[in-house]
Image (spheres, rainbow, N blue to C red):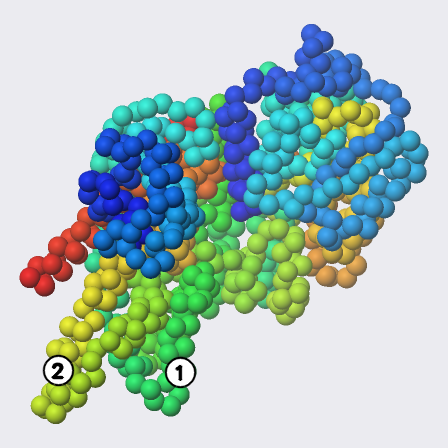
Amino acid sequence: MAQHTVDQAPVPAPLGKGAPRPGSVPEPPGRLRRALRSVTPGPTADAGGAALYRRWWLPWLWMLPAIVGTTVFGVFPFLNTILVSFTDAKPLGGAYDVVGLDNYTRMLGDSDFWLATRNSILYALIVVPLMVMLPLLLAVLVEKNLPGIGFFRSAFYTPVLASSVVVGLSWQWLLSDQGLVNTWLQKAHIIRDAIPFLSDSWLILLSAMGLTVWKGLGWYMIFYLAALGNVPKELHEAAAVDGAGAVRRFRHITVPGVRTSMMLVGTLTGIGSLRVFTEIYMLGGATGGPGGADRTLPFYIRDVGLDPLTGNAGYGAAVSVALFALTLGLTLLAQRLTKEDEG
Amino acid sequence: MRARRLTRTLTCIAALSLAAAGCGLSGGSDDGDATAGGCKVDKANVGSGELSGDVKGSITFQTTNLKKDFGDYFNGVIAAFEKEHPDAKVKWIDDPGDATFTQRLVADAQGCTLPDVVNINVNTAIALTRNGYLLDLDKKAPDAGEPFVPALWKSSLYADASGTEVHSVLPWYSGGIVQTFNTELMKKAGLDPAKPPTTVLGLFDDAEKVARASGGKYYAFLANPQLRIPADWQQMGIQIFSADGKSFTFADDPKTVRWVEAMTKLYKAGGMPRDSLSSTQDPANVYGQAKLVYGPTNPNFLRFIQQNNPTVYKKTGVARFMLDDLGHTVGAPQYIGTASTSKNAVTALAFAQFLTNAKNQLEWAKDPNVVIFPSTTASLDDPFFQSVKGTDPFAEARKIVASDRKTATADEVALTPGELNAISAQIQLAMQGKKSAEDALEDAQSKGNELIEQGS
């Protein structure tokens, strides 16, 4: 940030995040200012070292690829989606009309939309707590450097590397009526008739959640392994000396020690579980479960907005905006809860 | 099926992108302006009057993803053509035929650089004909249809810019359709492999016997209605769309209700795997595990099963596809189009006809690496298709399909993925007993109509 200070030192405007680049009202004309600055990179109070010799535009140059990338693939599509949501545009372009709030009115009155919203929220509510806790337990399990532990770490991480489609197919085989799970349960005389994992809409949804969790475990385990490394060993030793058992140490030392990571994992998996598509498709098929009952919001957006011939990109965009609002809402809620927790 | 849906989708992309570009496209007209689809063309290529002249000059010929496997065949055809017409030169290009094929081809056409002779599917044919990029064969070569199977030729009509249905393409090869079944399981279920069903509902009657006899060890076929819609309905003679194509009408036919009821009954009776109701399972694989009585209906599947499950292959029987009320099968062929923007249209047309003549089509069909059926009457009558040696299912299928292709038409109904999903979802609910067949069809129809409306 030092070079920033040099660059912006004479400007009275605030320098916080999102502040406009200075250079309009009280400034000398831009070219002159830049010329002055490039000639006299005079030292200011809090700049020093290499920063003194950098051109003012150098940091912008380094950031350019990221700025361009974010603008082209993030900011622009986002703003475009909002605009499109007020039109009846088609997925392939062409003429469109501005329809005002029609898409939003239609959305609120559409039972399929509400079903998809319910499924997405349920997905987040069930998957997030599991994703926050299970990988942590797994990380604690493989944290110690025991002989052969590398094998287990890799094994837990493997699902992360496998493609969603491959994993989905394996789960299809596991969960089908004559699949491994049903066969085992039947052989063990726990059940008589096969459990309809792949034909009952609730079970499809729950199985898909299981798939999401299983596939994500390894990834977040790595997060937690890194975080666990920062929990002081002395605390554990001291607690052990004082007679605290493993569970107690986990609750009072490990969990508080990785709290920040837990919040991060919670937010990331929350966003991820609102975007679920592949798992539902692999286990519930192209209709999103029998009767489309397992469709999540992204699935619904695909159905109404993306079909080249019968899609309505405007309506799809409106539902996308709703999905964004939902994601934002849940993220803010999570942050609020964290703060209250800390307070 | 999936490929067909995809191609339809792609055509739509193409058609819409044409609309987007705002091309006031017009076909060839008689007023002598000599343009086609916004491109300046030779006067002889448009308007009335037969195309005539010497076969000379160079043309480009584009196939779709065929160079890798059939290079020798096409080079042979080209060499033979060039030998017959020493002043003509054919430059062969091969398009990978990926998901953007139609889009790219339409873009080529708009840029007035459509290859002179080009291999296209139904949907590309629709898009190109509508905008006048293909020669109107009814005017330019009135005898062009002669070598082809009449039913196929008559149904290979597409609307030009004025909405008149014209012949703009020569039918080429197609995959065919055939019933396949596991004779051993059929006998177990008390069915006679020599008497396969001849109607769709007849198939369901037989399938119920399978359900009763199998005890859950094997099934008739997979449950997902997506695998049977809209083919079953079209075969049953159900009117799927209104005449103007702007709304669905399938729910208005009592036959559709009977079909949904048959699906529901069979599903409940255990004639279909319960977990296949909405799944993405491939029937070819399940059939290969000897768990299905009835296999997929494309002859190419027999090749697959021969290579992957020889035991099941040996037990496989084949029969003519159920003709039902429609009276013939449907199946869209690959087409060869001749560009109206061609600088050497006479040569291009001559090559298109040469490529699709009976001799050349037959030669390719004999290649052991393909399972394709020619569009020309003479090639289908060849001993290669007519004399079956032994009881090899594949050879039998070849004979059956060759005879079936003589009455098959090209006007196959296809749904967009969105329509297919919306309609199938409702049928699934009926099959689960959550809705009556009538209600499910009503809902399916109104959801389908919503999609048509929001897309139009």
- Write down the residue under mark 2: A248
Q: Is the residue B356 above or below the residue A9 in the image?
A: above
On screen, residue A79 versus residue B117, left or right, reads left
Q: Residue A21, located in which quarter of the rendered image? A: top left
SS state under label 1? helix
Question: How many other residues sit within 10 Å of disc 2, few (<14), some (14-19) or many (≥20)?
Answer: few
Q: Position of residue A245 (x, y in %)?
A: 14, 87
SS state under label 2? helix
Q: Residue B102, located in which quarter of the rendered image? A: top right
Q: Position of residue B453 (x, y in %)?
A: 39, 28
Of the numbered discs 1 and 2, the one sitting upstream in the chain is: 1
For badge 1, the amino acid type reads Gly
Q: Quadrant of the N terminus of chain A?
A: bottom left
Q: In terms of depth relative to the viewer, which is nearer, B134 or B211?
A: B134
On screen, residue B40 versus residue B327, left or right, reads right
- Write down the residue under mark 1: A150
Question: How many other residues sit within 10 Å of disc 1, few (<14), some (14-19) or many (≥20)?
Answer: few
Q: Which residue corresponds to the image point at 26% horizontal and 63% vertical from the top-left?
A: A265
On screen, residue A316 versus residue B93, left or right, reads left
Whether residue B439 is visible here, answered yes or no, is: no
For badge 2, the amino acid type reads Arg
Q: Chain of mark 1?
A: A
On screen, residue B56 versus residue A253, left or right, reads right
Q: In terms of depth relative to the viewer, which is nearer, A58 or A280?
A: A58
* CB contact under 8 Å: marks 1 and 2: no
